[in-house]
């Protein structure tokens, strides 16, 4: 193996944290293990991906409440559903692409239709890996949004993940959590923020531009806002941790005005945050131009993750440039 190979691999699975941003290791695994200390109903399952969805942390803390089903994502959903019918509270983890593309029917009919308390934990959502279309779940939200009663959560950072885990366990129905794993950024603890299912949060006020964001793009929105202040651009950031149910009231109140609105998401421009906001605007008669920062409607390249984020417009530098261009200063 050449000396360059480990560097290339590391770049393809690099942390999504920008330079200088503090991180927390495996917040999902630790939050789930901590929750299980307080609630004996909590169980964890995975389909041969415990290490790569941070479920291994839970497995080490609670081995008798951990189930490894092997490479069988459809069985994973069915087993989780069966556990939920007995009163247990399952968290079932795999990669987002496998949950959505391989196990959709089992999620829809075994979990969602009977409204069981199962949280599906999807690793590598959007462009959080450089390993090409087989692993990049750029359309996972679009696939799952049509399932009735399914909560969809796209956390921004470790703070969001830590608060979402107990909230989803306490909610009565099914949920899909877009997992941030490994060294996860920690940014929201600088703001007066609390996760709440179905609520968006104005984490940063501003007078010139409104960035409506979800997932890791909230971190990028906040970093871009700081950079844009150097250009005398005052930026508001609205974080939408819950994509379904969607907080139309908060988001439309923020974008219905003279400020330039953009949506920022780690997802295809089709079927995600941008279209959710645009649909709400049409139905409620809000007629302001809305610009998307999102992944294109195409299969993405493989390569080093930081390079791909620059290429597809998700990096902090790209967001700053895009806002300045939209304002006519680019």
Image (spheres, rainbow, N blue to C red):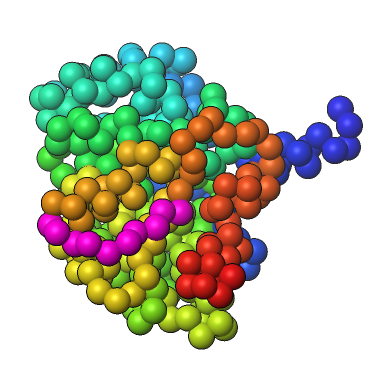
20 and 101: which one is in front? 101
The image quadrant where one finds the C terminus is bottom right
| Secondary structure mostly taken by the magenta-highlighted segment of the chain | loop
Q: Which stretch is magenta?
A: 284-293
69 and 140: which one is in front? 140
Q: Residue at x 46, y 36 (%)?
A: 297
Total number of numbered discs in the rendering: 0
Q: In the displayed structure, would residue 306 be above or below residue 81?
A: below
Q: In the displayed structure, would residue 46 be above or below residue 8?
A: above
Residue 35 horizontal/vertical position (percent): 30, 47
Instruction: Based on the picture, tell me whether residue 291 belongs to the magenta stretch.
Output: yes
Residue 214 horizontal/vertical position (percent): 37, 54
Q: Residue at x 33, y 14 (%)?
A: 75
Q: In the displayed structure, would residue 31 be above or below residue 84?
A: below
Q: Left or right: where does residue 173 sit relative to residue 177?
A: left
The image quadrant where one finds the N terminus is top right
Residue 313 horizontal/vertical position (percent): 56, 52
Q: Left or right: where does residue 14 sit relative to residue 282?
A: right
Q: Residue at x 44, y 27 (%)?
A: 97
Is there any visible trace of residue 9 in the rendered image?
yes
Q: Residue furthest right?
A: 2
Q: Left or right: where does residue 150 sit relative to residue 328?
A: left
Residue 279 horizontal/vertical position (percent): 22, 48
């Amino acid at each position: 193996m050449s000396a360059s190979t480990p560097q290339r691999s590391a770049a393809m699975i690099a942390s999504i944290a920008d330079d200088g941003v503090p991180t927390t290791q495996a917040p999902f695994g630790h939050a789930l293990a901590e929750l299980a200390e307080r609630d004996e109903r909590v169980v964890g399952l995975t389909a041969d991906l415990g290490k790569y969805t941070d479920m291994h942390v839970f497995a080490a803390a609670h081995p008798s409440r951990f189930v490894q089903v092997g490479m069988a994502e459809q069985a994973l959903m069915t087993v989780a559903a069966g556990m939920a019918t007995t009163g247990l509270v399952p968290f079932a983890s795999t990669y987002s692409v496998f949950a959505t593309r391989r196990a959709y029917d089992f999620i829809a009919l075994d979990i969602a239709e009977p409204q069981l308390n199962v949280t599906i934990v999807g690793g590598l959502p959007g462009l959080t890996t450089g390993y090409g279309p087989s692993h990049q779940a750029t359309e996972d939200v679009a696939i799952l949004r049509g399932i009735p009663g399914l909560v969809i959560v796209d956390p921004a950072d470790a703070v969001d993940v830590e608060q979402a885990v107990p909230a989803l366990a306490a909610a009565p129905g099914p949920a899909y959590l877009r997992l941030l794993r490994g060294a996860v950024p920690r940014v929201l603890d600088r703001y007066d923020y609390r996760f709440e299912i179905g609520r968006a949060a104005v984490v940063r006020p501003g007078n010139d531009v409104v960035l409506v964001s979800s997932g890791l793009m909230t971190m990028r929105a906040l970093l871009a806002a700081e950079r844009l202040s150097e250009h005398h651009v005052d930026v508001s950031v609205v974080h939408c941790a819950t994509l379904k149910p969607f907080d139309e009231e908060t988001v439309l109140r923020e974008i219905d005005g003279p400020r330039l609105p953009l949506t920022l998401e780690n997802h295809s421009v089709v079927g995600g945050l941008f279209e959710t906001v645009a649909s709400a605007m049409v139905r409620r008669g809000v007629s302001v131009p809305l610009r998307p920062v999102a992944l294109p409607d195409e299969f993405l390249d493989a390569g080093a993750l930081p390079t791909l984020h620059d290429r597809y417009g998700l990096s902090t530098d790209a967001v700053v440039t895009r806002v300045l261009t939209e304002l006519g200063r680019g």
